[in-house]
Image (spheres, grey):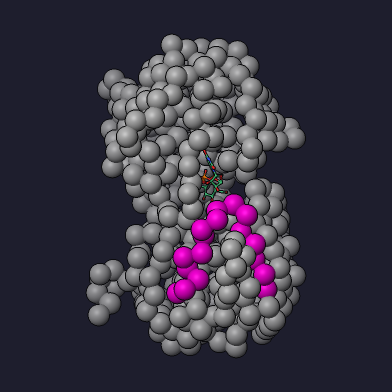
Amino acid sequence: MKSLVIEGGEPLSGSVPISGAKNAALPSCIASLLTEEPIVLHSVPQLRDVSTILYTLGALGKRVVRHDTSVSIATGGTLIPEANAYSVGQMRASFLVLGPLVARLGRAVVPLPGGCAIGARPVDLHLEGLRALGARVEERVGVVVVSADRLIGGTIRFPFPSVGATEQIIMAACLAQGKTVIHNAATEPEVMDLIDLLSKMGAEISVGNRRIHVTGKRSLGGAEHTLIPDRMEAATLLLAGAITRGSVSVSPVCPEHLDAFLESLRSTGVKLEVGETSITATGIARPIAVSLETSPYPGFPTDLHPPMSAFLSTAAGTSAIVESVFERRFAYTSALSKMGAHIVQDGTSLMIQGVDELIGQQVEAPDIRGGAALVLAGLAARGRTIITGLDHIDRGHANLETKLRSIGARIERREDSA
Ligand code: UD1
């Protein structure tokens, strides 16, 4: 069994480079389905989820060449409309191939998605959006079959600004006939980065006031694009500095992408120095408890709730976290409690009463961000923490232990934890 073994209690200090954003990389790779010409992406993080999506694109007929953190995705053989069940089962983001495939080929057969078990995570908004563009959508056992001679621009009003559904519909609308308007669209930085790439490919997209307008084109061209830095990785590493009462700098980052997180972190008393493309967090002996609620961008990101919760477990006083995006994102709390945290869950809220210290234990990562929370707790804890379930952590964090070791963490990967 693979595990991460952490000897906790070392204050971390130093600078860490931040990789390109996973959640920007996945849709950007998928956008290559919209064109016959090559898409070249830079700052692509070396993660399992990225390998999964590139594998999916290869199986659909794309030719993928990966060199270090650059990826070129060009036309290989004939594009096929049926996505592989294995890869879509591995990761929810693979479902985004649906819109581009139907827009390009007039038909797509895509299995229902898997991914982290952090809530119901239906795909109804994706399918409603495609229906609004004139597609016929048939749900069969385990797969969705979507067809349309040509998609027609339409108006969509999402009841909730879903990131995936927004990306799905933007991509499909790029090749639809006429104009599409998406009301209450997600405007996360990763969505905006996808729009940036699509615009370089020749798409006509404008954004304002949670509304996205897309004017469809007959075809899109190739493009070269550098992904935005991963705000989740940056925040997790800043928390590694804060929870160990050390001082960690991250760059490159877009500090404005982290406003809500930085505001909460600042109110705990952690000292922040924010530059144009870098941030330094310096921990204090006993941070102060805070209350926060997750919400769509520009609110506090749901992906940072578990890491923040680990940090607040060591604050003075009682913090409250309300999870408003994913109703079941709490699997990590039992492992944190095993490490000595005082966390009480009531529905989608947590009360976290800060403790003097966390204690190393053997725990299992339940999902990507819950895994990050346990790594943070392990870095701060007294004694040894052994974390299993590394497949989850590896899905979303590029070279995590190497980066942590470079700032003084005693962390290593082992094949056998027994
Ligand atoms: C993306 C991110 C994920 C992040 C999330 C919210 C990627 C690859 N993943 O996930 O890291 O946590 O945004 O910022 O970018 N929903 C529906 N019906 C739908 C679609 C979504 O009810 O058709 C609900 C979900 O169950 C959830 C909420 O909407 O409660 C938000 O989901 P969504 O924004 O779609 O998240 P993802 O795109 O899956």
Q: Quadrant of residue 185?
A: top right
The reply to whether the magenta stretch includes residue 323 is: yes
Residue 171 at what x, y percent from top left? 52, 27
The reply to whether the magenta stretch includes residue 191 is: no
Looking at the rendered structure, the number of numbered marks drawn on it comes to: 0
Give the residues drawn in magenta, as a range. 319-335
Residue 267 at what x, y percent from top left? 75, 70
Residue 341 in sight: yes
Residue 379 in sight: no
Residue at 40% over, 25% down: 138
Residue at 27% over, 22% down: 77
Residue at 37% over, 25% down: 145
Identify which residue, 391 or 126, lies in the foreground.
126
Residue 382 in the image: above or below residue 289: below
Residue 203 in the image: above or below residue 303: above
Residue 416 in the image: above or below residue 235: below
Residue 203 at what x, y percent from top left? 57, 22
Q: Is residue 405 left or right of residue 249?
A: left
Quadrant holding the C terminus: bottom left
Q: Is residue 159 left or right of residue 133?
A: right
Residue at 38% over, 38% down: 112
Q: Quadrant of residue 144?
A: top left
Quadrant holding the N terminus: bottom left
Q: Is residue 396 left or right of residue 274?
A: left
Residue 155 at what x, y percent from top left? 64, 22
